[in-house]
Image (cartoon, rainbow, N blue to C red):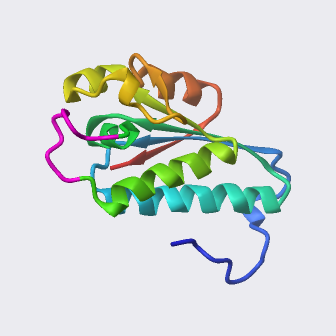
Amino acid sequence: MRIEEQTPTLVEDCAGLECAQAVWDFTAGDARRFRDRLELIIDAAERFKRQNIATDFVVLLHSASTQFAARSLAGTKFKDPETPDFFAAHELMRRFAALGGRIEVRRIAMDRCAIAPDNVIDCVAIEHNVFVNPVGLQNRGYAYMPIA
C-alpha cells in the first residue's frame, strides 16, 4: 500500500529548510503497524524531496522491532509466523534505504532474541547499543521520533 498525494502543496513549516534530519526509534513488534509507520516515513522523505529539501533519516530497531531485521524468524525467540506483512516490511526497509535512509539494529537486542548476524537483511547495519545513537543524533540536531 502506497500513500498517494492528494493535494500537491508545499509545507509552510518547511520554508527555508535545507535538510530534514530525524531518528525514528522503533520498538513496535506488530508487522502491520511497523509497515504503516515506515510507509509514513517514506512518504515524508518523498515530500521533503519534492520541496528540494535533503533528508537524513535513521531508523533504529530494538525491542520487538528487532524481528524485522531478520531474514527469517526460524530459531529466534519470536513465535509469530512470518506473515506476508513481515516480508512486506523487508521490502519497505529496502525502499527506505534506496531513498538514502539508514537502518540500524541493536546487537544487544539481537542477542537477546537469538538473531544471528548472518540472519540480518542486507539493508540493515548492526550497532552494539542503539541507545547511544539517538543521543548522539539528537545532540547533532536530529528530531527524535519514537515509534512504539
Q: In this view, does 123 lie to the left or right of 81?
A: right
Q: In which quarter of the image is residue 55?
A: top right
Q: Nearer the viewer, residue 48 or 69?
A: 69
> Residue extending furthest top?
128
Relative to 71, is 123 on the left or the right?
right
| Residue 109 position within the rendered picture, expressed as x and y whole percent measured from the top left | 28, 26
Q: Which residue is drawn at 57% across and 47% down?
A: 94
Of residue 76 and residue 130, the one placed in the foreground of this image is 76
Residue range (magenta)? 72-81
User: As displayed, is residue 64 above or below residue 132?
Assistant: below
Provide residue 69's location: percent of width, then percent of height.
Answer: 39, 38
Task: Name the foreground residue: 98 vs 52.
Answer: 98
Magenta: main secondary structure: loop
Is 1 situated left or right of 117 in this image? right
The answer to whether residue 75 is magenta is yes
Image side of residue 12 versus residue 115, left or right? right
Q: Where is residue 10 in the image (x, y as percent from the top left)?
A: 79, 70
Image position, residue 140 (x, y; %): 64, 26
Question: Measuring 63% from the left and 41% from the top, which residue is drawn there?
Answer: 101
Q: Determine whether 132 is above or below 87 in the image.
A: above
Q: Residue 35 lies in magenta, yes or no?
A: no
Residue at 52%, 61% (x, y): give it. 39
Q: Residue at x 45, y 58 (%)?
A: 37
- Residue reaching furthest to the bottom: 6
Closer to the camera in the image, 129 or 117: 117
How many marks on residues? 0
